[in-house]
Image (spheres, rainbow, N blue to C red):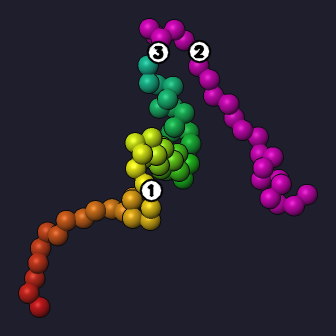
Amino acid sequence: MDKRRTKLMVKKKIWEKIVPISKSDRSFDIKFWQAQGPNLRFRVAFDMLKDFYRLKGKKINAHTFRLQRSVENLKKA
């Protein structure tokens, strides 16, 4: 088997918790996301951000998600 196919065959762990809404809290969500690696958390958060922009009808381009920084100090050369 080639390496690409074996990566696709990795077993996934399924998490679930079934409780009445009145007894639900965020503890399960916190445990789930803390068990995921930082790369996955970042990728999922970035995908949600892109979905938000699409739902609002905003265009996504190369500059959409750039960090905006303010100038704090100016020095004369």
Instruction: Return the residue found at the far right.
Output: 1
Q: Which residues are magenta?
A: 1-23
Q: Residue at x 37, y 63 (%)?
A: 66
Please tell me the numbered disc located at residue 60: 1
Earlier-in-chain disc, 1 versus 3: 3
Q: Secondary structure at mark 2?
A: loop
Residue under label 2: 18
Tell me the mark number nearer the camera, choosing from 1 and 3. 1
Residue under label 3: 24
Say above or below: 8 vs 61: above
Say above or below: 77 vs 27: below
In the visual, does 74 lie left or right of 18?
left
Alpha-carbon span between mark 1 and mark 3: 36 Å
In the visual, does 17 lie left or right of 21?
right
Q: Nearer the viewer, residue 58 or 73?
A: 58
Q: Do the CB atoms of the residues marked 3 and 2 lie less than 8 Å apart? A: no
Amino acid at dot 1: Ile
Amino acid at dot 2: Ile
Amino acid at dot 3: Ser
